[in-house]
Amino acid sequence: MGSTITIGYAGMTHLGINYAVAGAGKGFKIIGYDPKPELALELAAGKLPVVEPGLDEALQQRAQLMQFTANVNDLAACDIVYVAPDVATNDNGQSDLTYINELIAKVIPALNPHALLIILAQVPPGFTRKINFAAHRLYYQVETLIFGQALHRAECPERYIVGCANPDMPLDSRLNTYLQAFNCPILPMRYESAELAKIAINCCLVAAVSVANSLGELCENIGADWNEIVPALRLDKRIGEYAYLQTGLGLSGGNLERDLATVVNLAAEYGTDKAVIQSFRDNSSHRRNWPLNKLFDSILLHNPKAKIALWGLTYKENTHSLKNSPAIKLVRDLAGYTIHAFDPVVKALGNIGNVQFYDSAMAALDSADVLVIMTPWSEFKLADLGQIAQRMRNKVIIDPFKVFSAEQVKALNFEYITTGK
């Protein structure tokens, strides 16, 4: 491994940091730029602003190949510069492109005359072609990171989707050298196709999630068990063993909802059909009410003073992100109740006043009438059910993500409520 090619990443958010560390893992010299001096200093000192399995160790091991800076002119030493910030979304799933546009405007004047500029961020179709930069040196690359698996997916991509001004021409040799180091298929296509490809991937994922949630809810009402059905679906080659078929609480995290919003907006602009995509959004909104409904049905309607213990606040395990977290929605929906909470990463919620935090999952359980598990952190799966039974006043567990085994929980005389069953 190793190369004389220097790679720059502009925007040291979750996306840029993980890709930068992955590039150093292949032996490339990496320059990570962010306009915030304090962030550049923290990264240079090995302090990360994000939570990802293995990222701390990888950053320390690859530090000699990595430079972090708040001086945009340092990017002049790079052969390739990725603009890779996380693109924020509002409550309607719409992207705020202000920051990435500002970052591009800062980066372009700093580049050397031969450097490549690559957009590595979630942007709507048509974004890259509008950038005022030499077309033969401008690319768009699809990112497919998953929170909680980001470094692994950056290091071991399934494929690279690369948007080009002219996909019939070979990729620039420097970009080809860099991408080939990751040993996966490379799929060149026009800018708009690459930008839409990321949206298409997420729409297919959402379709599977929506089907699982819709039919899982039906299972809860007719005596079927979705978990018994899933193996049959995975053995169908048209669906496959890796399909997203687990029941859950709708869409969270922001990226999937952003892509659905983009398709709905483009459909309205061009007069194409949006009914299927809109139905996915509607289904997600419906599913978000599942834990609240179960909480009232199981205990709050007959015991409005019940003590509620909640495990997990992040939108999924192995991340710090609260973006569109089902747990946060539940907490807000329960504004009149005090929530006794524990999360391995989140220790405070500045703008939400009805949450009392505890130092451990077990401490949050003392004298609780109901336990609601809203994030399937691995440490929760190891919890001692006998100790849980001893600490709780009433034995009710609402577990939408199936952290516990239903059989083991019921053997201890818990009322156990989960999705799809």
Image: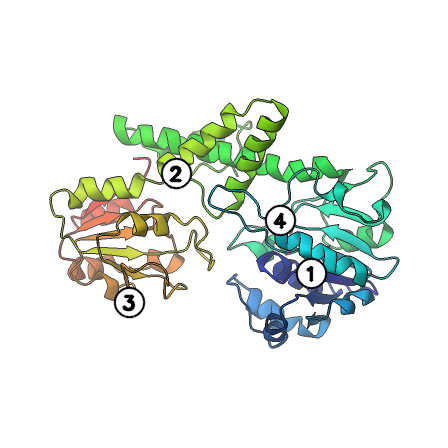
**Residue closest to the far bottom:** 45
Q: Are marks 4 and 3 in contact (CB under 8 Å)?
A: no
Where disc 4 sits, the SS reads loop
Q: Are marks 4 and 1 in contact (CB under 8 Å)?
A: no
Q: Nearer the viewer, residue 298 or 123?
A: 123
Camera-side mark, 4 or 2: 4
Which mark, residue 10?
Answer: 1
Camera-side mark, 4 or 1: 4
- Which sits earlier in the primary sequence, circle 4 or circle 3? 4
As measured in the structure, the alpha-carbon distance from the residue carrying label 4 to the one carrying label 1 is 15 Å
Q: Identify the residue shown where x is 52% and y is 39%.
A: 242
Decide if residue 172 is on the left or right side of residue 81. right
Q: Are marks 2 and 3 in contact (CB under 8 Å)?
A: no
- Which sits earlier in the primary sequence, circle 2 or circle 3? 2
Query: Residue 282, position in %: x, y?
Result: 42, 32
Q: Which residue position holds label 4?
A: 97
Query: Residue 299, position in %: x, y?
Result: 16, 45
Q: Which residue position holds label 3?
A: 358
Q: Which residue position holds label 2?
A: 247
Camera-side mark, 2 or 3: 3
Query: Residue 143, position in %: x, y?
Result: 64, 48
As measured in the structure, the alpha-carbon distance from the residue carrying label 1 to the one carrying label 2 is 37 Å
Categorize mark 4 by other alpha carbons within 10 Å: few (<14), some (14-19), many (20+): some
Query: Residue 7, position in %: x, y?
Result: 76, 61
Camera-side mark, 1 or 2: 1
Q: Is residue 52 above or below residue 139?
A: below
Report the amino acid beneath label 1: Ala
